[in-house]
Amino acid sequence: MDYKKTAAEILKLVGGEKNVASVTNCMTRLRFNLNDAKKADVEAIKKIKGVQGVVTKNGQFQVVIGTDVGNVCEEIKKLGNFEENAAAESEEKKGIVAAFFGTLTAIFQPIIPALAGSGMIKALLALLVALKLVDAGSQTYQIFNAFGDALFYFLPFILAFSAAKRFKCSPYIAAVLAGVLLHSSFTGLNTGDPVRLFGFIPVTMVSYGASVVPILLIVWVQSYVEKFANKISPKPVKIFLAPMITIIVTGIIGITIAGPLGNLVGQVIAVGFNWLNDYAGWVIPVLMGTFCPFFVMTGMHYCFAPIQTIQYATLGYGTILGPGMLASNIAQGTAALVVGFRSKNKDLKQLGLSSGVTGLMGITEPALYGINLRLKKPLYASMIGGCAAGLYAGITGIHTFSSTTAGIFALPVYIGGDSFSNVINAAITIVISIVVTAIATLIIGFDDPAEEEAAPAVEEKQEEPVKAEGIKITIDSPLEGKVIPLSEVKDDVFSNEIVGKGAAVVPEKGEVRAPEDGEVASVFDTGHALGMVTKDGVELLIHIGLDTVELKGKHFDVHVKQGDQVKKGQLLITFDMEAIRKAGYDTTTPVLVSNTADYLDVLAKKEGKAGEGLITVLK
């Protein structure tokens, strides 16, 4: 890959240097904060050689590259002269929940490589001790144990630096405040006797080594104190007065309020998950094994890292991420490999094999975006395999003793304690994930692009008489308006054709009419969506607007009920377009063939006026 060329093309198509507030990367994705996301040409970016896909979530524009992402990101920063610590957010408003998870992701994402590397050192050391190749009492063991354990013990320093970048305050002062928590003069006071500042302010003594929440709260407080200190400090003495005020004021608040409060929050979280592990230990691995691809798509998997770290600090092992992600990652890689072995398309075969191998190693984005999400059926198969393996992992109670990327090479992190049963069950989890996913992928199958090359020719000849070897079913539009392709719909479920293929209509009139003769299969209570089956057996889903389920039926009037036989042109639903738009909702209406898998192909009108021939189904 020509990193410089790829970087230049991406930077140009996201709207240029002036449209980029900041850019960073994780293991496989470029993460842009754009001033105006509408300026980015998503379809053109997807066509760049080396780009696996594009995702927009929580105000962040993400370009999936793969394992070369670091090199591409470096070139983009050079071309745009972006600062390494740029943390600017787009001006787009975010909800409280989105902002919270976005903050956790931004803080933990940069330290993931360090966590993974340190975790693997500890895992390999455990393996060497188990094989009796290294003596646990030797000096060599102690030295390498320090290599692997340093990050976890001094985690407040690492988090302080990362959090300061997010909260836009001095990372060096943040590191000093982390040092206060671990300094021997302070920790030496923890003898069991009451500790008081100035003789009357109580200080709750807490062991802050390997802690997570306390330092995050302290740096958050610092961000406000530092601004105030800079504002009140005279310019001639600001260079020392502002930092001094920040350290003293934040330090006092930290050891008396923020630190103990953060420790209490961490304990509550730990107790909650410990209870869940004791009484329903299989739940988390099953949920993570099944739905991890969607957590990865939204970046939410980083948000579980603080909870996992709290478990390590309180219990010495973790169950939140490792077992479920192991089941899911192996399943993702296996599904992509099966596609690679079975596909007749050379490009898809190469991508399937390469991304499948990296998926087995624990890096799943290339497999997820390049193969599984793109073809959809392999994604369903991987979810089945991940669920089965996650169930076994949960029932047997496997857990990790350190953090690293969840893949085949992560087996050593399951070594610990007095028994090998934990690592054996982890290996069985991998086998179950591979076997179940492979079988599910073979049974469900996938639509190989090599077998669909003739489809465009059929679309161009729609006016020709039906040939003996195929049948065309034409579906007219249920609404009046402008046709746009599903790829332009601002909802990943529809734009990625997860529910089915079809088209979308930007309505000009608030009426939905039966596009063909058929039967009403379902009517949502909220009136925003309706399913029907045409006389030819085509299952249609008409979804009026995006996220309009939140209106709870307001502005919608349904004129039919489930089981009604309807004629073409019959009024089904009326809706108040203007009221829906004023409420802040997009009225773009996807019209989908929900049983797409039953047909050779589903071709849709890409643009123009909605009317006759919106969708053509090839049987």
Image (cartoon, rainbow, N blue to C red):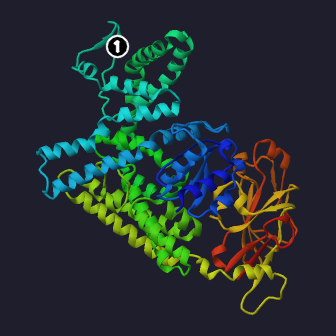
Question: In the rendered view, does 617 fall on the left or right side of 9?
Answer: right
Where does residue 488 sit, x and y in percent of width and height? 72, 58
Where does residue 255 sit, x and y in percent of width and height? 37, 20
Q: Is residue 384 visible?
A: no
In the rendered image, the quadrant that contains the C terminus is bottom right
Label 1 crowd bin: few (<14), some (14–19), many (20+), radius 10 Å = some
Q: Nearer the viewer, residue 582 or 177?
A: 177
Where does residue 568 sit, x and y in percent of width and height? 86, 72
- Amino acid at circle 1: Pro
Q: Is 143 situated above or below 453? A: above
In the structure shown, which secondary structural element does the residue marked by tag 1 occupy? strand
The residue sitting at 27% across, 45% down in the picture is 148
Question: In the rendered view, does 96 fall on the left or right side of 281?
Answer: right
Q: Is residue 589 visible?
A: yes
The residue sitting at 30% across, 64% down in the picture is 427
Q: Nearer the viewer, residue 565 or 618?
A: 618
The residue sitting at 38% across, 18% down in the picture is 256
Q: Is 121 situated above or below 251? A: below
Q: Nearer the viewer, residue 340 or 208?
A: 340
The residue identified by callout 1 is 202
Where does residue 303 sit, x and y in percent of width and height? 47, 44
User: Where is residue 398, by image quadrant?
Assistant: bottom left
Question: In the rendered view, does 342 fall on the left or right side of 509?
Answer: left
